[in-house]
Image (cartoon, rainbow, N blue to C red):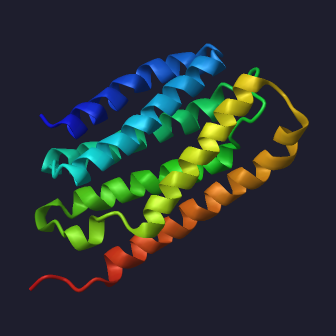
Amino acid sequence: MTVPNALTLLRILAVPFFAIAVWYGHHLEAVLLFAGAGITDLLDGWIARTFHQKSALGAILDPAADKLLTTTAFILMTWRTDGMAAPVPVWVAILAITRDVLMSFTALAHMGNWRTDIFRPSFLGKVTTAVQLAALSFGLLANAMGPRPWTQASFPYLYWMCAAFVLASGLHYFWRATTSPRPA
């Protein structure tokens, strides 16, 4: 058990508490839990690279923790909209979750001939994750602050940008998986 893996497990353990906070409308607590999870995500990657603590378990757990957190946030910020200043539009959540599910099924289908060049996160995929986390973070923060004039004006654009990156990275991963040469 490396320090980065322990931080990733801590992030996974935070997800139910985050979900409970959103479900019951405790928006400030949800923001703090989401921010804490984001900090552990940054820390585990930095520690793994800086101190050479990368592991096969971490390569699986880290993206799984990210997907668990973002999927939970997308679902709850779409479903539990009472008192939310910046709920996520249903179509954005469906697009983001569908992309992740399709990528997971594709990875499972290729388990027998695992190709790290196909399934390694791309730059576009990392940017998409960052945009998703930023959109969700700002949405959670806006929910904690309550309705403000700027939330009505800015959040549709932020969620549209999130959807555009989700779509672009999903198409990129599909293209990369289907056009890469097959092993002999």
User: Residue 45: percent from the left, percent from the top?
Assistant: 31, 48
User: Residue 8: percent from the left, percent from the top?
Assistant: 29, 36
Q: In the image, 6: left or right of 76? A: left
User: Residue 87: percent from the left, percent from the top?
Assistant: 71, 35
Residue at position x 35%, y 63% from top? 121
Viewport quadrant of the N terminus: top left
Residue at position x 82%, y 39% from top? 151
Residue at position x 75%, y 35% from top? 86
In this figure, what is the number of numbered marks? 0
Residue with the most extreme right position: 149
Residue with the most extreme left position: 184
Residue 114: image quadrant is: bottom left
Residue 57: image quadrant is: top left
Residue at position x 66%, y 25% from top? 80
Up-down relation of residue 181 to residue 139 (above or below): below
Up-down relation of residue 6 to residue 134 (above or below): above
User: Looking at this view, is 165 or 44 the one in front?
Assistant: 44
